[in-house]
Amino acid sequence: MDLPLSTSDFERYERSVSLLQEVVAQINKDFRLNGFDVEFSGQGETAYEELSSQLAPVIDYMLEHQPDTFWNLIYSIDLNENKVKHILFGQEEVSDAIGQLTDLILKRELQKVVIRNFYSGKQLP
């Protein structure tokens, strides 16, 4: 059986409040190590956007004032460093680099939650 990690799977997961609550716990675990905390209202329809709007200023702040903390976070989350560097330092200018980084982080955290649930036999939405 293949891991359910297709684009359509992710679109479904992004609307799952229960999965996103686990993502918040995962984000807080990773971000707390670096002195940041995320809150989640639990509103299903706007949950993913809510998380994104909370993370974007934190990521922006880290890049501006704590670049070492940012890179430690990237390593602890296990993000693809080349993708991050391409967004930040690539040939073409990226108009919404913070938004793209935020999305990359959220998708990786969501992926970790889905993989953990999948291998523990939990039902995925």
Image (cartoon, grey):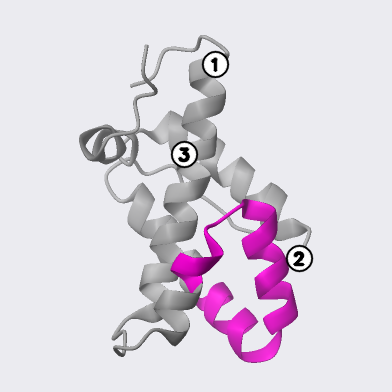
Q: Quadrant of the C terminus?
A: top left
Principal secondary structure, stretch drawn in magenta: helix
In the image, 33: left or right of 91?
right
In the image, 70: left or right of 98?
right
Q: Is residue 53 magenta?
A: no
Report the magenta residues as a range.
Answer: 57-84
Q: Which residue is mark 1?
A: 119
Q: Position of residue 45 (x, y in %)?
A: 27, 44
Q: Nearer the viewer, residue 74 or 83?
A: 83
Q: CA distance from mark 3 to mark 1?
A: 12 Å
Q: Secondary structure at mark 3?
A: helix
Q: CA distance from mark 3 to mark 2?
A: 21 Å
Q: CA distance from mark 2 to mark 1?
A: 28 Å
Q: Which residue is mark 3?
A: 111
Task: Give the mark nearest the N terminus, 3 or 1.
Answer: 3
Q: Amino acid at mark 1?
A: Tyr
| Mark carried by residue 34 | 2
